[in-house]
Image: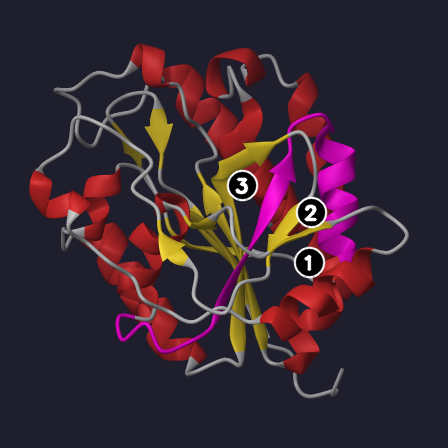
Amino acid sequence: MTSTSPLPAAFIGHGSPLNALERNRFTDAWRSFGASVGRPRAVLAISAHWYVPLTAVTAMAEPRTIHDFGGFPDELFAVQYPAPGSPDLAAEVVSLLDPAPVVADDHEWGLDHGTWSVLVHVFPDADVPVVQLSIDASQGIEHHLAIGRALAPLRHSGVLVLGSGNVVHNLGRIDWAGEDQGYDWALRFDAAAREIMTTRPGDLAELVDHPDFRAAAPTPEHLWPLAYIAGVADAAGVVAEPFVEGPTMGSLTMTSYVVPA
């Protein structure tokens, strides 16, 4: 692994899959972030939507675009993100996480919408290789923080580590009329995450004991990608910075963070 100046790492609050088609203040911020990064060697994406009871990494040369949702316009199902994969990066990830078992998946998964709905804005030319890392659903937040710490060296070899989820994600309590609104509990939880990420990211596990945790993360898969980026920041001895913030539809927050280079 060649040592170079580190790339940033980022967590992006991806929200609705329709963001892939839209230009709004969130997607404009993602585009600005991508422009600031330049062209990395590859992206390692940790998406809320590959949530399985093991750790796996995509190892195919040509990952497919997965449309893992329903009830959206045909235009969204037509989106393709034909970025190449990187078997070499997949092998590096397996090595970094050793002795933990990691499945090298060379045919099953691909790029789900947690990854491509963001990357169509961050790297719209789809010319940067992309590898996805699954979230082990059988493990708690400390496990995911530890994996983030283990992945931190990738930043020194031209790899952008990118988490994609939402700090607050409760689909059961969405207010469809509240486009830029957030419930009090959602705003409190998002603020608590912000305080930790911007001062002491290694303590992110404290969020599990927050009184609004069950409302904010009734299932944790959208929050856990933040733990990987917190782990990267903790390993580097730096803090993260929000680069776009705000609630939507009451029970989602779109806050995104960057771990600076």
Residue at x 44%, y 36% (from the top left corner): 166
Q: In this view, does 127 lie above or below 32?
A: below
Say which mark, if any, is on residue 201.
2
- Please report contact status of discs 2 and 1: CB closer than 8 Å, yes or no: yes
The magenta segment is 124-150
Q: In this view, does 181 lie above or below 23?
A: above
List the single residue furthest toward the front.
Answer: 107
Res 185 → quadrant: top left
Q: Is mark 3 on a helix, strand or loop?
A: helix
Tell me if 256 is positioned left or right of 4 in this view: left
Query: Which residue type does callout 3 highlight?
Result: Arg
Q: In this view, does 114 lie above or below 259?
A: above
Q: Reading the chain from its start, which is encountered first: label 3 or label 2?
A: 3
In the image, is residue 177 part of the stretch drawn in magenta? no
Q: Is residue 251 above or below residue 162?
A: above
Alpha-carbon distance for marks 3 and 1? Answer: 14 Å
Res 226 → quadrant: top right
Alpha-carbon distance for marks 3 and 2? Answer: 9 Å
Alpha-carbon distance for marks 2 and 1? Answer: 7 Å
Q: Reading the chain from its start, which is encountered first: label 2 or label 1?
A: 2
- Please report contact status of discs 3 and 2: CB closer than 8 Å, yes or no: no
Query: Which residue type does callout 2 highlight?
Result: Pro
